[in-house]
Image: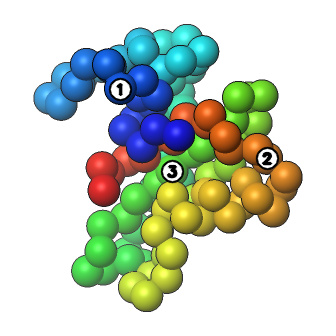
Amino acid sequence: MSRTGGHSSGNCPSFAGSTSLPSCAVGVPPMHSESFMQQAIVVAATARRRTSPNPWVGCVLVAADGRTAEGATEPPGGRHAERVALDVAAAAGIDVAGATAYVTLEP
């Protein structure tokens, strides 16, 4: 599973400073990658003003079958967005092997 805004391949180019997402997420068309990243931003906003001094982060996991699970950073002492999304996926019976994670902040 990738943790870098949709990259799921080790040979994906970096997109630091770019205004668009890479098109190298395996099996995910670029237009969908952008919408999943936008959704991660929306999810992150749900944690705004609740996570200080930690940043508010959102995560959208996209499984190989297309199902998704989302998570946002919990208040201090709580789970990170990625862990929340993984727990949501597990509770929903979503297989995350090979999934792509769209995360608003690189850990």
Residue at image mark 2? 94
- The number of discs equals 3
Outermost residue toward the left in this view: 17
Residue at image mark 1? 10
How far from the left and from the top, in percent, is residue 30? 48, 13
Amino acid type of disc 1? Gly
Examine the rendered structure and indicate whether residue 58 appears above or below residue 35: below
How far from the left and from the top, in percent, is residue 12? 32, 19
Left or right side of 2 for 88: right
Left or right side of 54 for 82: right
Examine the rendered structure and indicate whether residue 51 appears above or below residue 71: below
Outermost residue toward the bottom in this view: 77
Please give the name of the residue rendered at 53% of the width and 18% of the height, measured from the top-left corner. 26
Residues tagged 1 and 2 counted as in contact (Cβ below 8 A) = no
Please give the name of the residue rendered at 61% of the width and 57% of the height, measured from the top-left corner. 85
Q: Circle 1: is it few (<14), some (14-19), or many (20+) Cα within 10 Å?
A: few
Q: Is residue 27 visible?
A: yes
Amino acid type of disc 3? Cys
In the foreground, 81 or 11: 11
Image disc number at residue 85: none
How far from the left and from the top, in percent, is residue 21? 35, 22
| Front position among marks 2 and 3 | 2
Q: Secondary structure at mark 1?
A: loop
- Tell me the distance, in whole angstroms, between the alpha carbons under discs 1 and 3: 20 Å
Image disc number at residue 59: 3
